[in-house]
Image (tube, coloured by chain):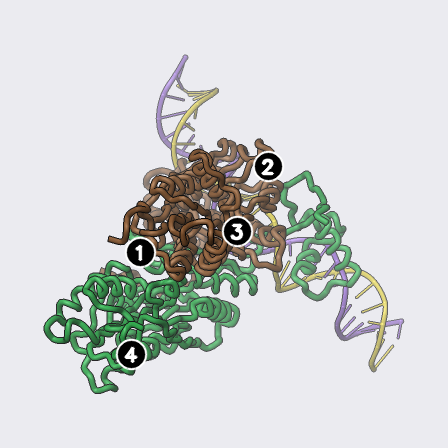
Chain colours: A green, B brown, C yellow, D purple
Amino acid sequence: MGARRADRARKRLTIAEIAALAGVSTATVSRVLNGKRDVSPETRLKVQRIIAAHNYQPNALARSLSLRRTHNLGLIIPHTAEYLVSFPYFSELIRGISQRANAAGYRLLLATSSSERSSEETYGEVLRGAVDGLIVVDLKVQDERLRWLRREAVPFVLIGRPLEPEPSSEVAGVNCVDSDNVGGAYRATRHLLELGHESIWLINGPPEHAVSVYRERGFRRALEEAGRSAEGRVLAGPFTVEAGYELTQTLLARTRGRSRGGIGIGIVAASDLQACGAVLALREAGLRVGADVSVVGFDDVPLARAFDPPLTTVRQPIFEIGKEAARLLIRQIEQPDAPPLQTVFPTELIVRRSTRPLAHSDE
Amino acid sequence: MGARRADRARKRLTIAEIAALAGVSTATVSRVLNGKRDVSPETRLKVQRIIAAHNYQPNALARSLSLRRTHNLGLIIPHTAEYLVSFPYFSELIRGISQRANAAGYRLLLATSSSERSSEETYGEVLRGAVDGLIVVDLKVQDERLRWLRREAVPFVLIGRPLEPEPSSEVAGVNCVDSDNVGGAYRATRHLLELGHESIWLINGPPEHAVSVYRERGFRRALEEAGRSAEGRVLAGPFTVEAGYELTQTLLARTRGRSRGGIGIGIVAASDLQACGAVLALREAGLRVGADVSVVGFDDVPLARAFDPPLTTVRQPIFEIGKEAARLLIRQIEQPDAPPLQTVFPTELIVRRSTRPLAHSDE
DNA sequence: CCCTTTCTCGAAAGCGCTTACACTCAGTAA
DNA sequence: TTACTGAGTGTAAGCGCTTTCGAGAAAGGG
């Protein structure tokens, strides 16, 4: 074991040298390399031996240039998405994408767009033939990237769904994969309703994220179905602990007087971080979370379970989303005529202790 | 604004076409593109106009093939590193690396090694000329990757420092960047000593990670300096909440009888997740964290601040580490003869409420 | 006015692959 | 025997860049 041929000469071999060693032409070596026909079994074997003996690896660049295929997938990460980046979300996504990509013989190229550069520049640079297609994450409400991608006619898939304001033909003609944010927010809200909460609020993400729009829809739908109004009950801010904390204070200020000291408040937050911030603010106001009031988060980060109280939260299958995105992109690359697909993954409400029936006093 | 030239023909132009349009040779266009001399100001201007007018982007592949330089940096992520991946650590690192890389005109290629493939295969595939150099993260105690990288004579930088067991020449001859884990663990431990804790423990990461070895060293040094023994006071396990929880239970079992109901226990954990798990277990055992007992974590994840009690923790400048790693790698690539460098970033102890002087009762 | 030197620029040879095309040599059908 | 297959192979023309080398023109020196 481990007794590898010690090739002292570390200079990389070329196909021509392999061909010479095997006494055949480069064309034949290429055929063997790519498992093509028109090579006799004996020749094939002979060439394979030489290749193995010298641990020859064809140069990916030359191959790409010739094939006009890089086998690179690009993932575009907006620099504005610190929340993505400081989170399991991002890591899980990458894991999912690269697992699928690697399995299919593709590599993953990361393109972080920096603030100074227009999308034109950013992706143009990435694009100079460096990738076969792009995955776009963190879709904005009016996302300039969409127009650009379409104009460039480059294969791409969105993580997140574009909003209807776009001509409907546009929405349909696009590969995208998303989790059911509407449903997730809907179920979280219904959950609070069912627990008997009177004053239900949404602490949403920034309104320019498409995901915020969808979550607000779910929230509104649940309230309206229950015959309640959602007017004035949506606060928005970054996906951070601080925002959760401050927005909850705002919310408490607004609610003061109206309800009995805040008891009966139910909050749906757009991230677990915000939810934790909310818990902090509520506790500071003398309210018992999971007894007087309830909070539900979004994402199910590893610490949600360890939090006090353990956080009820909406889980998204991020890893799966990544895998699916890669799958769709590769499909689009390899079968340009395949009709675009929209995949939506279900979200799951994980009920823990931060949400409890109202009457219930702390056990 | 935004009134971009609407190039209907989306076919990518080649340098030859630009040359023809400008009435010069491809050599001249190439010179202009690369800012080389031997082009008259007028010619240069003329060519630049054509390039701009057609929004020409030279094909990166062809350029790479010709220059024998891809301008891709590879980041190798071991599949075993779920803890990395489920954490801000990983995202921050990527942010740092790609910021620096992009600034210097490099791209970031992600290589996740899957379990079925040997390092030989994994990196070999990446290597077929697809990257100019590699960044290796999550160094193991005896890391096979090191041998391989050296044999392949590919530029690389380690995140983390190899351990001394390796011939010292090897350690010195390598680019690496790390945070001061020894110092971090040392300060965390001293902090507990100074607070008057009698029974101090390390809940460490898995022993095969080099980082675990370094942290244990810092822990031991602090105890030994204080004239105490560290024997039997180190428990190891994954960087998860669960591990922190279970190891703390083990620890409590061992300590039972010896001390007054666990009061006076101080725990240094190798991750904030473990620390949170520890807090859970301690609380379950009826101990008040930040009063009867103290816990310090590692990483300063966003939720550490929001935890109850807010977690004292050791912060590492992960973003900076990423930037530095990219810098060193690019330097190695562009100046192959530059002597390898070792950078160590200081860690910082963030004191919050999970550690308090012993006598102090809950305020 | 001739000889160097300097500045511009183009022709063409790579970089390491893939593949269209031509060719050879059985084997088969007529 | 002749013509026609088709499998197996090699030749060479790309893929889109960079760069060496040499030529021609302009400038400077004696």
Lower position in the chain sequence, tag 2 or tag 1: 2
Label 3 in the same subunit as label 4 = no
In this rendering, the label closer to the viewer, 1 or 3: 1
Residue at the spot 40% in from the left edge and 42% down from the top edge: B189
Q: CA distance from mark 3 to mark 4?
A: 41 Å
Q: Chain of mark 3?
A: B
Residue beneath label 3, please?
A: B206
In this rendering, the label closer to the viewer, 3 or 2: 3
Residue beneath label 4, please?
A: A357
Residue at the spot 52% in from the left edge and 69% down from the top edge: A334
Task: Specify few, some or many for label 4: CA neighbours under 10 Å numbering under 14, 14-19, or 20 or more.
Answer: some
The one nearer the camera, B203 or B98, is B203
Q: CA distance from mark 2 to mark 1?
A: 42 Å
Lower position in the chain sequence, tag 3 or tag 2: 2
Q: CA distance from mark 3 to mark 2?
A: 20 Å
Q: Chain of mark 4?
A: A
Q: Position of residue D19 (x, y in %)?
A: 50, 38
In this rendering, the label closer to the viewer, 3 or 4: 4
Q: Residue B309 shows which numbered tag? A: 1
